[in-house]
Image (tube, rainbow, N blue to C red):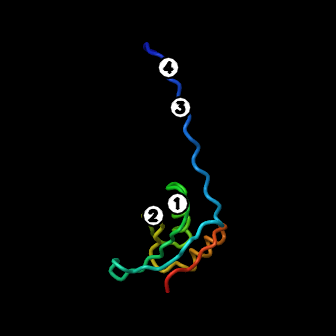
Amino acid sequence: MKGGARVPRQKEAPPPAPSDPGKSRVRVGLESKGRRGKKVTVISGLLLDAMELDRLATRLKQVCGSGGTVKDGSIEIQGDQRDRVMQELAGQGYKPKRSGG
């Protein structure tokens, strides 16, 4: 080891705990505007940090057998997957509501 003093590592702040799922106002809707007629299931109102949102999106994509992404704090799943998404979210303790038509 060459000269120099050891610098103690700073402890990282613990990640924020996921919010209580029952308190989130989760909306599950269907959009097709600006997507050349393709339908996308949009899940919004989740009070989660970016990592938790990514984990939930991955789980929902697996359940639906479909692709998707996380954009602007909401999850988009390809196709009309509202029923499957609502069932999975309810199983995880959320109280999802269908929005739109």
In this rendered view, identify the residue nearer to me: 93 or 77. Answer: 93
How far from the left and from the top, in percent, is residue 3?
Answer: 43, 13
- Whole-Å distance between the Cαs marked 3 and 1? 27 Å
Q: Residue at x 55, y 57 (%)?
A: 52
- Whole-Å distance between the Cαs marked 1 and 2? 7 Å
Q: Residue at x 42, y 64 (%)?
A: 71
Q: Is residue 78 left or right of residue 98?
A: left
Between disc 3 and disc 2, the foreground one is 3
The secondary structure type at the circle numbered 4 is loop
Report which quarter residue 55 is drawn in. Answer: bottom right
Per the image, the residue denoted by label 1 is 53
Between disc 3 and disc 4, the foreground one is 3
Between disc 3 and disc 1, the foreground one is 3
Of the two numbered discs 3 and 1 on the same chain, state the one appearing first in sequence.
Answer: 3
Per the image, the residue denoted by label 3 is 10
Of the two numbered discs 1 and 2 on the same chain, state the one appearing first in sequence.
Answer: 1
- Whole-Å distance between the Cαs marked 3 and 2? 31 Å
